[in-house]
Each structure stands twice: as C-alpha cells, then as structure tokens.
Amino acid sequence: MQPPRLGALPPIRALQTRSGRLTYVKSGQGSPAILLFNGAGVSLEGWRPLYPEIEQLGTVFAWNRFGMQGSDAPGDRQTGTVVIGSLRELLGYAGLQPPYVLVAHSLGGLYANLYARLYPQEVAGVLLLEATHPEDQGALQGHEDQLVRSLGKLLELPELFLRANVEVELGCAEETAREIASAGEFPPVPLRVVTGGLTPRAAATSPAVVGAKRAKQQELARLSPLGEQVIAQQSGHFPQLTEPELVLSALRELIVSL
C-alpha cells in the first residue's frame, strides 16, 4: 500500500484541565461540531490525511488523550468515563458547544459508544471506523500495538505510537466495556459503521474469528434504527487511510441526514 498523502493540521494547542494538560486542534467553522476519537496509542496526527477535507464540513476538534503527544501522563485509570469526563472539560474550556458528530476509529469507538449513551442530548450523529465492539475489546490485546506500529511507519510519524499509552488504554478497555453495558441505551441518531472488507493476514485469524468480528460490526450498525453498515472492500483496520473518499462520503451523507 502506498503511503497516504499527508494533509495539513492546524497548530496544536494546549489547555490545562483539572486532570492535567491536554493538547488538541480545533479549526473550521459552523455546525456541526465534529469530534475525532483516535484509536489506542494513536495521536491526533492519525487524522492528518483526512483533516483538510473534514474541516470543510464544519468545526473540527481532535485531541490527544493523556499520555499522547504533549498531553500530560495519565494520573488516573483511563476508563471510558474518565476519558469522556476529561474530554468534556476540555471542550468546555475550548468553547466548543454541542451538538456533536462523533467520528471514532478502533478503540476510540468504545469511547464514542459510551459518550452517546451518557450524553445523548449532545450527540447528533456517529461515524464508527473499524470500531471496537464492547465484547471484542479483549481481542485487541497483542494486536492493536502491532497495527498502530505499522501505521506509524506508514505515515513516518514516530510520535504517532507510544507503547506505554496503548498498554494503559487497553488495560482499561474491559472496564470501559462494562461502563457501556451499564449506561443508557444508544440514542436513535444517524449512525454509520465502516468495516474493513479485507481479511486480516495474521495466521492466528481463523474463519470463525473473522466471522465473529463481522457479526459484531453488524451489531454496532443496529445500535440505532438509523444505523447503516458500509463495507470498505479494499481496507483492513484503517479505512480512513486506504479508502479516504469512502470514509468522507459516509461522513458527508451522515451530516446531510441530520
């Protein structure tokens, strides 16, 4: 696969929250406000290839969770409620008001899933990209770091990947899944679930595992009566890099439906 063309990011800013310093970017204008949720161990640099195009659709906000690219080291266990709490505090300081469209990749899908359940009145729509299902978060152990390492090499961005941060976040994924289970229902908002159509090359990936993963992606699409699944036929775990136009089309369609 050829390296994606890197887009331009606005200057990274920083704000001090009660839990520590967080770095972020914010640009664009108008509604909706689009929040970008990174995968485990991935900084906001992972959105660089798509950022200029997303910026044309509204106000865009991406941030580095604690432990990533200029943000302070985490002081607490980074469960979903803790991550969302620090995000909402940061959004308040940055002056970005709801409603939000949540765009989430991989482990970031757990946080977006929980956010939509805890604060449905703030969420206008959700776009999930190869998002983690609450029941398959355990499968990330031992695989997510390899995927993100490959992405970092592809983009030639060493700051993209921090092993310690992956371990911290994956160590809390099971607890985050329990928080999702005990939260309210997912809201009936427009939802798009983009799933990679390529079968993973890993020798340990059996047909049964692949089938289970696909079934769980379909379950994510059924979270909302307005949910739809989109198959990225030429993509694996990073459709935003391998099929950016498909991802952008799904986001545009979602926004038009609001």
Image (cartoon, helix red, strand yellow):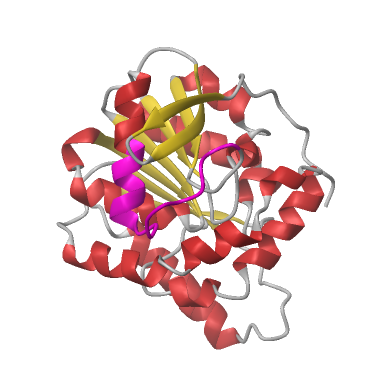
Examine the rendered structure and indicate whether residue 207 appears above or below residue 32: below
Asked whether, in this view, residue 26 is left or right of residue 228, the answer is right
Asked whether, in this view, residue 176 is left or right of residue 56, the answer is left
Residue at the location (27% across, 58% down)? 223
Residue 258 visible, this angle: no
Foreground of the two, 236 or 119? 119
Residue 217 in the image: state x and y as whole percent.
43, 65
Examine the rendered structure and indicate whether residue 226 appears above or below residue 79: above
Residue 171 in the image: state x and y as whole percent.
46, 69
Asked whether, in this view, residue 238 is left or right of residue 225, the answer is right
Residue at the location (47% across, 25% down)? 60
Residue farthest to the right, as pictured:
2
Residue 93 in the image: state x and y as whole percent.
33, 23
Residue at the location (32% across, 36% down)? 18
For the record, the magenta segment spans 70-87
Foreground of the two, 122 or 72? 72
Q: Quadrant of residue 164?
A: bottom right
Q: Quadrant of residue 176?
A: bottom left
Residue 34 in the image: state x and y as whole percent.
41, 30
Residue farthest to the top, as pictured:
29
Residue 240 visible, this angle: yes
Find out whether residue 75 is within the magenta segment.
yes
Residue at the location (16% across, 36% down)? 121
Q: Quadrant of residue 54?
A: top right
